[in-house]
Image: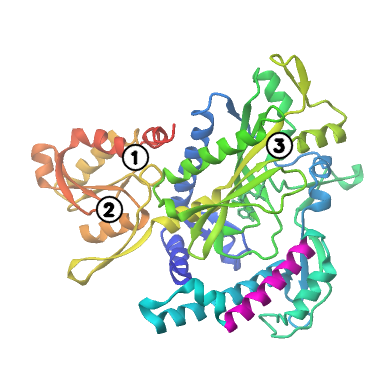
């Protein structure tokens, strides 16, 4: 899938009420988006799928909903005040600000592109006899570019690892990276920039306190660990799940809802005995990838990306990446965070955050496996997987969102063939009977064909057409979104036919 398709997905999202630019009538607020009437339904269904998979399918996982504002010392303890930074560089001519690491990554990607194009050209030239591996190992131009790339990559990884800002700048200068806007190499120094948004709580006269908008929901779980463990009489191993907003002052905010300044996370911290964390890490990797694959977006669309460089608190980490229109990208992170967070909160708060294990007859600080997925990235992968343009017979075409029925915003479109003869009333009767089971949409405007297209475009898995025969024998024509086939069915059977297919329970059963 290409950038071109990505642009179409963005405009489709807007046209059909999935995602709007925030504050659009004021020319928008960068990297902030609103979910429209269809988007909110799809988003709620994604959240429900995640929430139920955590708290229904695991009797040792419970949920909480902690506040966005938290005591500022929490962010000292978590390391976010001191270490949640991006290295930034400004171009003095365009006055544009960039992430230094992203400029270098983009440069590396360009070298990769060059190499791949060279290989593609050769493959065309040599045809079937082409041996790609051999070509990569022997072609002088490729070898030269590859060596250049490896050298930059090694320097780059070292500079990042050592947080050496001068070296990062030197790489940008040595690679002759220019500002995409001014085209010049007139760069400032590289500076660290903290990603947390700060605001003030209380009036200034009282001595206002600087507080942060949380950059992750996880800390709300850590600081409630003992509250939940004690009041819920939870025994290790157990998990706490949470869905909520998080805020990051992202500098390079691009790719639509992939990188936002206000976004939503679904996080679960699973508390285990020290020494058992890697076993649980492997189990949660397995559980989470099954959750993704059950949606049917294609197993080849996912891959794990294990981290070579681990954060100081982690002893294992992987990302689940999905193939977005702009390449494989992180949708979810799974981390074995050791006892870092709980220990750190013990130290900063002076309160014990330990668990007494009756089986071992001793107290300890539990280790933690975290699964953390962005709702908005899941939403974007869902749109990318579902968006299809299809050529139909007779030279027509349609755009259809082949959403998993359990996630679709509207489950059933109810369409009276004409706006008279009692057909609208019959259609309303059907909706009144089914509205308790799932979301239906009534549509009487335009031809049936146009109405089908509108339902296809929002991913409605079923439509029924109410015609004159419906009044006589209580049947309707049901049309299936993906195959476009139609059949005559009894109105009394609709609830069963549709409920079975759109049921969250049936989706959960495939992984439960
Ligand atoms: N508690 C761990 C944590 O927050 P993270 O990798 O920084 O880890 C977890 O974030 C997930 O949150 C990511 O995999 C991504 O899906 C989502 N996420 C992070 N930053 C985001 C942003 N700026 N916009 C949208 N989603 C974001």
Q: Quadrant of residue 364?
A: top right
Q: Earlier in the sequence, mark 3 or mark 1?
A: 3
Q: Which residue carries the number 1 mark?
A: 502
CB contact under 8 Å: marks 1 and 2 = no
State which quarter of the image contains the N terminus.
Answer: bottom left
In the figure, is residue 505 to the left or right of 233? left
The mark that comes first in sequence, 3 or 2, is 3
Left or right side of 219 for 287: left
Quick check: 475 above or below 378? above
Label number found at residue 482:
2
The residue lying at 53 percent from left, 60 percent from top is 328
Cβ of mark 2 under 8 Å from ligand 1: the answer is no
Which of the numbered marks, if any, corresponds to residue 220? Answer: 3
- Cα gap from disc 3 to disc 1, whole angstroms: 33 Å
The magenta segment? 140-160
The secondary structure type at the circle numbered 1 is helix
Q: Per the image, is 150 magenta?
A: yes
User: Cβ of disc 1 within 8 Å of ligand 1?
Assistant: no
């Amino acid at each position: 899938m290409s950038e071109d398709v990505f642009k179409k997905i963005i405009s489709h999202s807007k046209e059909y009420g999935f995602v709007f630019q925030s504050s659009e009538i004021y020319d928008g607020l960068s990297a902030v988006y609103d979910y429209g009437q269809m988007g909110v339904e799809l988003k709620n269904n994604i959240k429900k799928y995640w929430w139920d998979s955590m708290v229904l399918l695991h009797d040792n996982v419970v949920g909480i909903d902690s506040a966005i504002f938290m005591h500022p010392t929490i962010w000292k303890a978590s390391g976010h005040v001191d270490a949640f930074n991006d290295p930034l560089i400004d171009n003095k001519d365009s006055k544009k600000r960039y992430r230094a690491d992203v400029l270098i990554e983009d440069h590396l990607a360009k070298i990769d592109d060059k190499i791949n194009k060279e290989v593609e050209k050769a493959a065309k030239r040599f045809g079937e006899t082409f041996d790609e591996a051999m070509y990569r190992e022997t072609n002088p131009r490729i070898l030269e570019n590859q060596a250049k790339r490896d050298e930059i990559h090694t320097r780059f990884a070292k500079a990042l690892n050592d947080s050496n800002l001068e070296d990062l700048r030197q790489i940008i200068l040595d690679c002759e990276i220019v500002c995409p806007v001014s085209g010049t190499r007139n760069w400032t120094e590289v500076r660290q920039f903290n990603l947390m948004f700060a605001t003030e709580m209380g009036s200034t006269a009282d001595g206002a306190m600087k507080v942060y908008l949380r950059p992750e929901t996880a800390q709300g779980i850590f600081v409630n660990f003992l509250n939940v463990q004690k009041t819920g009489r939870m025994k290790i191993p157990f998990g706490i799940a949470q869905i909520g907003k998080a805020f990051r002052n992202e500098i390079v905010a691009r790719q639509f809802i992939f990188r936002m300044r206000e976004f939503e996370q679904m996080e679960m911290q699973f508390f285990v005995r020290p020494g058992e964390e890697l076993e649980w890490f492997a189990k949660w990797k397995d559980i989470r990838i099954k959750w993704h694959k059950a949606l049917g977006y294609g197993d080849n669309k996912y891959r794990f990306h294990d981290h070579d460089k681990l954060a100081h608190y982690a002893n294992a980490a992987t990302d689940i990446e999905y193939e977005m229109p702009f390449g494989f990208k992180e949708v979810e992170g799974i981390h074995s965070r050791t006892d870092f967070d709980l220990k750190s909160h013990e130290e900063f708060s002076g309160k014990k955050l330990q668990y007494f294990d009756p089986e071992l007859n001793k107290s300890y600080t539990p280790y933690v496996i975290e699964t953390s997925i962005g709702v908005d990235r899941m939403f974007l992968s869902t749109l990318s997987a579902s968006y299809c343009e299809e050529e139909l017979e007779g030279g027509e075409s349609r755009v259809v969102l082949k959403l998993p029925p359990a996630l679709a915003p509207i489950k059933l479109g109810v369409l009276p063939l004409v706006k008279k003869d009692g057909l609208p009333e019959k259609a309303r009767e059907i909706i009144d009977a089914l509205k308790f089971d799932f979301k239906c949409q009534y549509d009487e405007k335009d031809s049936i064909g146009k109405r089908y297209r509108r339902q296809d475009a929002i991913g409605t898995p079923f439509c029924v057409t109410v015609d004159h025969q419906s009044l006589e024998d209580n049947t309707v024509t049901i049309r299936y979104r993906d195959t476009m086939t139609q059949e005559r069915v009894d109105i009394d059977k609709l609830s069963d036919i549709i409920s079975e297919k759109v049921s969250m329970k049936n989706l959960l059963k495939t992984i439960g």
